Image (spheres, coloured by chain):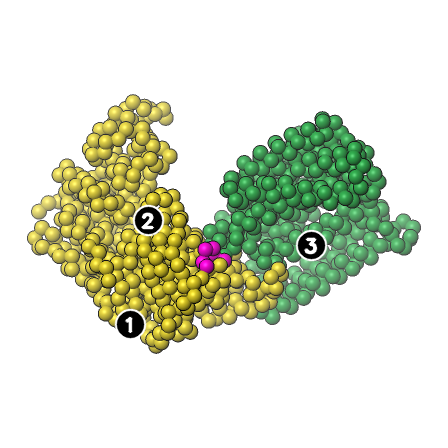
């Protein structure tokens, strides 16, 4: 039983957020009189939050390395503007445009990373400047107008669903099958890690918790897939997101680069004296953020089917809030990809639920602000207690 | 006989695992300059922290009497209230503020929260006159030299109506003229009835101004010498400081010394900010296979700076010189190149520079050599677990598991994690900077054993230590460093604490 209590104590943060997400979902399910879990709404919820999650992945790495990026909302806008000019005005192939925009995102990230990592200007200032610069450039490029519409191929990035190979009426069977394969794969991987850890005498979850955790995770995946399947199936964006989340979880927890980013944020001097090229690492963290912001910009533009000067306005705040709600530390070195994703979902469910019950944007912001504060308060309380 | 102004009775202070002060008695007579001497780590600073309330009443045992009344200080401001002011080694001035702002910081000349600048300035002119500093009170502190800043500190103490002034190595960073000025000021204050406690490593200064000398060793009072009745020689003080049995504190070792494995020639380093200040000049040192070479010297002598400049230029500017490994010149111009060439440097400040405290033991151990547990991209976690558990066993790291955060380890175990990290980087030359600082005797012995084992494996070890007995106890050869220069070199067998101490402390350079 000792391992159970110590397990709960060590992991309370991770699970508290998941429980909070579930509580919030149930709460809104009741308050919206059942609309929240309707297949069409769940699909919308995923689509609405996809770009927040994509950016939260990059933002988390930046926050872990000890900094912040305020410019991501403006990068979303400027990339959308460039894409619209290329596709709509200049008739460039949309796939080529996607490539160009991602590279442009990398260039924007390199611009900011250079100032932060090599010239040592605080990221807060560099990205505040970036926020103004890229917003301004968006207005310049769009000349203050919205540009659209886009070809269907481009729109499908956000609005498309994966093809169903089975044609069973009323249910998107491919989605269910993918969900089942996914659940099995996760259980298998988790079990393998567990065996490995036990082999080397590491602390492992009590078997009871291990089983419970896997049952809950599988049930959640299958539940989500079932809901989506009874509407139009898996959205393309969700597949893309899943790939990204998996990739970044892997990078942050299993790779040399990930380990070094944590070390950089945890103690920059110690990392440097251990031979980590800290400026270069920080530079690439910003380049990565730029690429993900560009990707988010493309998703937003495809979803709205037009590029507008105010696209992505204030989005950086939701992204940053998602990371902090998800347990990232403002002083760097601490944070998990899965936490940021859960944080993004908490923000997303609240946005969605509050909109459905007709709460104005004013009160929505008040509630979101309070939730952020409570989440971080919980962290501080936990830290002081130990 | 004059009145006793301060008396500390049976002071005992323990830190987790270490007894820093053991039944210390210390008293100061009114109107005298009382010097407090002892090796680094003898407990001088701890004693002064107890006295000034940095360690509040209740965290130590024993009593403090000031002017006959028992004092139980809650914090520094409490002790300052009754006229007890400590001036720390690192100056506590705010460099971006002016003299007058600093003088009255926390003691502002104000009425209902509004500062009266006229009164402040006129009072500060008076205070500056007393300490002999001719500066405009509106001068920004950072634009003045360290000597003048020191005087501002003393003026600040005078502003608080100081009765007993405590100076912790006030002249450590001053040149000779400034030091003399400061010592004269102490004598002058004495004639105005202000007593002082002077902590210093410079024996010539002490014999110049002190009325009595108390020697601390290993957290206990050795003796108090009266300078008025007897003539105290420097040798007499040194004997008191180092006179201890050092035969059984160090594990024995087989000495098998091979050819020169690492050598640095004509090494020059300049200060990173004050780029005209040379912190290492014309240094030539070498270490042989299986040899432990010590760098002895005072804190601030430039040993850490030298070591870090060698380790991938991690300190200093305009570094010039040559490095050779087994006779071949090597490039150590960046940290990763130094590591690649088999050089490792374990820092003196393990918390700030050595460990990522919020990460666990295994992540800290592998940080400097992630290549060895990965295919270049992906970390092989099982391999990481197995290699780190090897080190846990070999170095006897006491922990609940390898996933324990290093912040929760004791000093000795933290040091073992730092050592493990560098051992895992498989260096041929290890520079160990104060590897036993702040850890208890048992853990020290273990660290010495590890050092011996490394030497017997044929590695070259450069040991920086401020503890003389340690240098003499485990090194084969000793370099003596003073003010960035190598001022002496001798086999440890021929060195006695007295000889080394003399080299470290006396002013005339004895080039060998």
On the question of residue B333 being in view, the answer is yes
Tell me whether circle 2 and circle 1 mark residues in contact (CB < 8 Å): no
Indicate which disc residue A246 carries.
Answer: 3
Q: Which element type, helix, strand or loop, lies under badge 3?
A: helix
Residue drawn at 29 percent across, 58 percent down:
B486
Residue drawn at 61 percent across, 51 percent down:
A336
| Disc 1 residue crowd, few under 14, some 14–19, many 20+, Cα 10 Å | few
Residue drawn at 50 percent across, 58 percent down:
B336
| Disc 2 residue crowd, few under 14, some 14–19, many 20+, Cα 10 Å | many
- Letter of the chain that mark 1 sits on in the rendering: B
Indicate which disc residue B248 carries.
Answer: 1
Residue drawn at 55 percent across, 61 percent down:
B370
- Corner quadrant of residue A44: top right
Provide the residue span drawn in magenta: B331-336
Q: Residue B474 colored magenta?
A: no
Q: Nearer the viewer, residue B304 or A16?
A: B304
Residue A183, compared with residue B155, is above or below; it is below
Would residue B68 appear left or right of B324 to someone viewing this image? left
- Letter of the chain that mark 3 sits on in the rendering: A
Give the chain ID for the yellow colour: B
Q: Looking at the picture, how far across and down is residue B150, in whole percent?
A: 27, 40
Indicate which disc residue B278 carries.
Answer: 2
Q: Label 1 to label 3, Cα distance in Å?
A: 57 Å
Name which of mark 2 and mark 1 comes first in the sequence. Answer: 1
Q: Nearer the viewer, residue A42 or A74?
A: A74
On the question of residue A19 being in view, the answer is no
User: What main secondary structure does the magenta stretch of the protein show?
Assistant: loop
Would residue B17 appear left or right of A102 to someone viewing this image? left
Q: Quadrant of the C terminus of chain B?
A: bottom left
Give the chain ID for the green colour: A
Indicate which disc residue A148 carries.
Answer: none
């Amino acid at each position: 039983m000792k391992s159970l209590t110590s397990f709960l104590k060590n992991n309370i943060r991770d699970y508290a957020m998941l429980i909070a997400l579930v509580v919030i979902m149930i709460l809104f399910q009741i308050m919206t009189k059942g609309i929240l879990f309707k297949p069409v709404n769940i699909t919308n919820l995923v689509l609405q939050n996809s770009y927040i999650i994509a950016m939260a992945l990059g933002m988390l790495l930046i926050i872990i390395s000890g900094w912040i990026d305020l410019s991501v909302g403006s990068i979303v806008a400027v990339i959308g503007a460039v894409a619209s000019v290329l596709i709509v005005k200049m008739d460039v192939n949309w796939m080529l445009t996607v490539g160009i925009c991602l590279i442009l995102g990398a260039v924007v990230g390199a611009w900011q990373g250079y100032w932060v990592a090599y010239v040592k200007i605080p990221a807060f200032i560099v990205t505040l400047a970036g926020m103004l610069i890229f917003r301004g450039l968006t207005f310049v490029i769009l000349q203050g107008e919205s540009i659209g519409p886009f070809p269907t191929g481009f729109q499908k990035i956000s609005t498309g669903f994966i093809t169903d190979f089975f044609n069973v009426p009323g249910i998107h069977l491919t989605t269910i099958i993918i969900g089942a394969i996914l659940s099995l794969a996760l259980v298998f991987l988790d079990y393998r890690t567990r065996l490995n850890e036990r082999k080397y005498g590491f602390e492992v979850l009590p078997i009871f918790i291990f089983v419970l955790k896997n049952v809950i995770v599988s049930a959640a995946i299958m539940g989500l897939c079932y809901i989506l399947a009874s509407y139009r199936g898996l959205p393309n964006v969700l597949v893309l997101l899943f790939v990204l989340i998996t990739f970044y979880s892997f990078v942050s927890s299993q790779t040399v680069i990930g380990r070094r980013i944590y070390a950089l944020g945890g103690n920059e001097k110690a990392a440097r004296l251990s031979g980590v090229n800290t400026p270069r690492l920080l530079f690439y963290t910003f380049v990565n953020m730029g690429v993900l912001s560009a990707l988010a910009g493309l998703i937003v533009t495809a979803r709205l089917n037009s590029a507008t000067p105010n696209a992505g306005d204030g989005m950086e705040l939701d992204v940053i809030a998602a990371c902090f709600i998800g347990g990232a530390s403002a002083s760097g070195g601490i944070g998990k990809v899965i936490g940021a994703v859960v944080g993004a979902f908490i923000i997303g469910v609240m946005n969605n639920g509050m909109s459905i019950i007709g709460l104005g944007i004013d009160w929505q912001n008040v509630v979101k602000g309070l939730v952020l504060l409570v989440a971080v308060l919980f962290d501080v309380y936990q830290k002081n207690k130990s | 006989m004059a009145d006793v102004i301060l008396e500390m009775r049976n002071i005992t202070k323990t830190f987790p695992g270490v007894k820093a002060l053991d039944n210390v008695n210390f008293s100061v007579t009114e109107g005298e300059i009382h010097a407090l001497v002892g090796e680094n780590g003898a407990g001088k600073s701890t004693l002064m922290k107890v006295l000034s309330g940095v360690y509040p009443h209740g965290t130590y045992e024993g009593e403090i009497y000031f002017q006959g009344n028992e004092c139980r200080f809650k914090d520094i401001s409490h002790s300052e209230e009754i006229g007890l002011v400590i001036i720390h080694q690192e100056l506590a001035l705010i460099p971006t503020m002016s003299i007058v702002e600093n003088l009255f910081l926390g003691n502002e000349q104000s009425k209902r929260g509004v500062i009266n600048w006229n009164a402040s300035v006129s009072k500060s002119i008076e205070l500056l006159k007393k300490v002999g500093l001719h500066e405009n009170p509106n001068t920004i502190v950072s634009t003045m030299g360290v000597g003048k800043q020191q005087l501002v500190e003393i003026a600040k103490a005078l502003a608080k109506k100081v009765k007993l002034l405590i100076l912790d190595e006030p002249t450590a960073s001053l040149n000779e003229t400034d030091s003399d000025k400061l010592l004269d000021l102490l004598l002058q204050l004495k004639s105005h009835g202000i007593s002082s406690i002077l902590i210093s490593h410079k024996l010539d200064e002490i014999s110049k101004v002190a009325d009595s000398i108390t020697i601390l060793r290993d957290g206990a009072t050795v003796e108090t010498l009266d300078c008025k009745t007897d003539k105290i020689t420097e040798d007499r003080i040194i004997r008191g400081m180092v006179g201890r049995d050092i035969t059984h504190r160090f594990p024995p070792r087989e000495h098998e010394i091979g050819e020169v494995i690492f050598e640095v020639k004509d090494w020059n380093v300049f200060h990173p900010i004050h780029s005209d200040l040379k912190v290492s000049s014309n240094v030539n040192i070498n270490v042989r296979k299986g040899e432990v070479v010590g760098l002895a010297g005072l804190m601030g002598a430039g040993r850490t700076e030298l070591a870090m400049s060698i380790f991938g230029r991690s300190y200093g500017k305009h570094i010039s010189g040559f490095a050779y490994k087994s006779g071949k010149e090597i490039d150590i111009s960046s940290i990763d190149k130094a590591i690649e060439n088999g050089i490792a440097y374990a820092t003196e400040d393990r918390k700030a520079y050595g460990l990522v405290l919020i990460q666990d033991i295994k992540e800290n151990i592998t940080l400097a050599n992630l290549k060895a547990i990965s295919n270049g991209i992906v970390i092989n976690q099982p391999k990481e677990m197995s290699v780190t558990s090897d080190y846990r066993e070999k170095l006897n790291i006491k922990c609940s598991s390898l996933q324990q955060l290093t912040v929760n380890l004791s000093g000795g175990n933290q040091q073992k994690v730092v050592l493990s990290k560098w051992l895992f980087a498989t260096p041929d030359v290890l520079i160990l900077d104060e590897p036993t600082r702040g850890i208890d005797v048992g853990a020290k012995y273990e660290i010495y054993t590890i050092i011996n084992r490394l030497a017997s494996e044929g590695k070259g070890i450069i040991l920086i230590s401020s503890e003389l007995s340690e240098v003499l106890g485990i090194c084969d050869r000793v370099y003596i460093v003073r003010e960035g220069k190598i001022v002496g070199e001798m086999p440890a067998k021929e060195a006695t604490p007295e000889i080394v101490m003399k080299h470290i402390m006396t002013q005339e350079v004895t080039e060998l």
